[in-house]
Image (cartoon, rainbow, N blue to C red):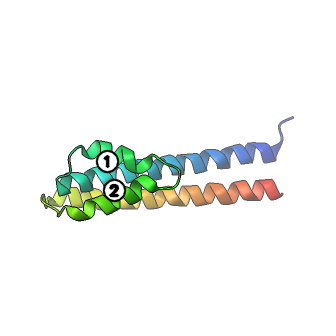
Amino acid sequence: MVDLNMVLAIICSAVAFVGVFCVSFQIYRMTVIDATARGLKHPKLWGFFTISGNNASGLLTYLIRRRKYLIIHKDENSFKQLERCKKIAGIGLLFVVGGAIGLLCTILI
């Protein structure tokens, strides 16, 4: 017989994993949009660089590096995409928190 707590733990872990993937992808997209607007070379490489690393050192490096570049391309569509990415990242964070709380509850019970 399958243990219900084990099934709930696996489901909560999957929900948290989906949230982590969603947030990481949205950070990648926001970095690419920002780097393109600022005219940095290789914006997709910068996007990948921001999500690589365990302690957000890539994101911090990008944020420090981008200070030298002003926004060149003031495209309204890019700013709308950026706002959409922020909302989706917020939903992803809710998934992470919900999955973590559910996992914690299944472990403690």
Which residue corresponds to the image point at 16% horizontal and 53% vertical from the top-left? 39
Q: Secondary structure at mark 2?
A: helix
On the rendered image, what quadrant is the N terminus found in?
top right
The answer to which quarter of the image holds residue 108 is bottom right
Whole-angstrom CA distance, mark 1 to mark 2, is 7 Å
On the rendered image, what quadrant is the C terminus found in?
bottom right
Give the camera-side residue of 55 and 85: 55
Q: Residues within 10 Å of mark 2 (few under 14, many from 20)?
A: some
User: Is 56 left or right of 61, judged from the image as shown?
Assistant: right
Report the residue marked by disc 2. 62
Report the residue marked by disc 1. 46
Q: Secondary structure at mark 1?
A: helix
Which residue corresponds to the image point at 37% horizontal and 61% vertical from the top-left? 86
User: Is 35 left or right of 101, judged from the image as shown?
Assistant: left
Q: Is residue 102 above or below residue 3?
A: below
Q: Is residue 94 above or below residue 28?
A: below
- Amino acid at circle 2: Tyr
**CB under 8 Å between discs 1 and 2:** yes
Q: Residues within 10 Å of mark 1 (few under 14, many from 20)?
A: many
- Amino acid at circle 1: Trp
User: Is 17 left or right of 45, judged from the image as shown?
Assistant: right
- Hey, which residue is sitting farthest right in the picture? 1
Residue 42 percent coordinates (x, y): 24, 43
- Hey, which residue is sitting farthest top in the picture? 1
